[in-house]
Image (tube, coloured by chain):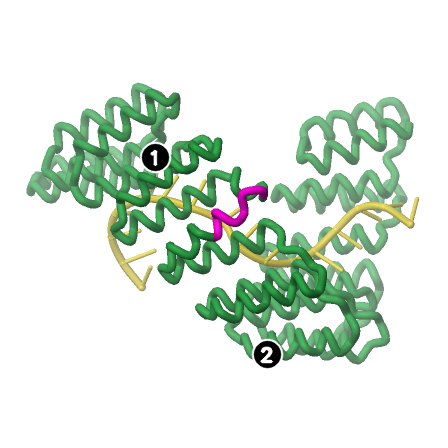
Amino acid sequence: YRVCLHTFGALCIEGKLGAAWRLRENMMLNGIVANLLCHNHLLSGLCRYGYLDTALHIFSSMVNAHIRPNRATCNILVHAFCQKGFLEDAWTLLRKITNEDRDQVPSNIISSTIMMDGYFKNGDVIGAANLWSGISQQNTRIDAIAYNVLIHGLLLNGHPSLARGSFCGMLKAGILPDTVTYNTLLGGLCKEGKFDEACKLFAVMSLEGISPDEISYKVLIQGLAIHRDLTTATKIIGHILTEPLLHDPRIWNYLIDCYGKCGDVKTAMALKDDMLRFGVEPNVFTYNALIYTQVKRQNLASACNLLREMQINGIEPDVVTYNMLIGCACDLNFIAHALDFLNEMIRKGCEPDIITYTELIRGLCLRRDLASAQGLLAKVLLKSRLPI
RNA sequence: AACCGUUUCUUUGCGC
């Protein structure tokens, strides 16, 4: 029995919902009653992967099975509603389960935090602020997460000074900021381009005994990249040799893309070799970012060289790769080449998408072959069954 | 008691 429940929970957390579902049916057949904890695991798994409707269905079946939802059940569903932007539904559900009055601030800090986050992410700062003042007037203890949500929400909606004020409020209230708090503030500073202050905050973190995690570095690197200070961003990479982040190709890909878009193709290419040196394998994203630098210069030949190189290294081009190549061929008025690429991708089982066809139609229009362009458009519309 | 809330995430056309 215990094993069953435990396994069930684990499957839900891992997102193996199909397996969890079968186990559930098996359990029911064998008369093993899934308890509340089980249901909560299932609901949170379903919600995490976007199956809110199914979750609601299960939820109503719980009532029939005389399993009383608890606060966690409620919060899981409220959270899912908020994520979809259905704040009203979230409130309704919350009040239904908890029997709390309308216009009353939830008595539970997690529920309140979820709702406040929902307001902020929907851009409703007033709604969030009202809720916050309600929370502050309660006797419930406000925890670090609630403050983190507040700070992040204010930053997200363009109120950095209010966010800083809330951080001070947090300190005054004796709540210790954690890594998430600092990362949130770092992100805000980076967005504003205040890198000196960001560095100071880094120092404060270490003074307080809170060590930066990989998100801290990612925030900093991406912030620098957005503000075109790629040199510093690349230097930071050198400082995090021991971090797991270094082995994440995405951060490398991101930098390669940034360098490429800044026009520094050389460094972009060199970074690909650097990542290899650090034992990080370039992937299709890496090559696509590099190919982009070439197609932007209408250098189809070297784009094709990169294509060959990636294939030699066992990386198969994807729809993005082909779209770029097709676009480049079209720019150069090499419509035959473009169609070759189209055939090649189809042959390889790579499904063309709306961008593929847009590029081709653009290419045909460029050479004033409007008849073919219209013909292709008609084909696409037919294929996608879109109304004309 | 356990289960629930917060920070960052890579590549292509056009439009906004």
Measured as percent of width and height from the top left, residue A136 is found at 77, 77
Instruction: Name which quarter of the figure residue A300 lies in.
Output: top left
Identity of the residue drawn at 18% across and 44% down: A297
Judging by the rendered image, the residue that carries numbered circle 2 is A162
Q: Is residue A386 above or below residue A222?
A: above
Few, some or many C-alpha atoms within 10 Å of disc 2 (few <14, some 14-19, many ≥20)? some
**Chain letter for yellow?**
B
The chain identifier of the residue carrying mark 2 reads: A
Q: Residue at x 72, y 79 (%)?
A: A133
Q: Would residue A66 be seen by someone viewing this image from the given angle?
A: yes
Q: Colour of chain A?
A: green
> Residue furthest toward the left?
A368
In this figure, which residue is indicated by the disc labeled 1?
A: A287
Report the number of discs: 2
Q: 10 Å neighbourhood of mark 1: few (<14), some, or many (≥20)?
A: many
In the image, which residues are magenta? A236-242
Label 1 sits on a secondary structure element that is helix
Name the foreground residue: A232 vs A115. A232
Please state the chain letter of the residue tagged with numbered disc 1 in the rendered image: A
Q: Secondary structure at mark 2?
A: helix
Give the percent coordinates (x, y) of residue A158. Answer: 50, 73
Q: Are marks 1 and 2 in contact (CB under 8 Å)?
A: no
> Alpha carbon of mark 1 to alpha carbon of mark 2: how far?
42 Å
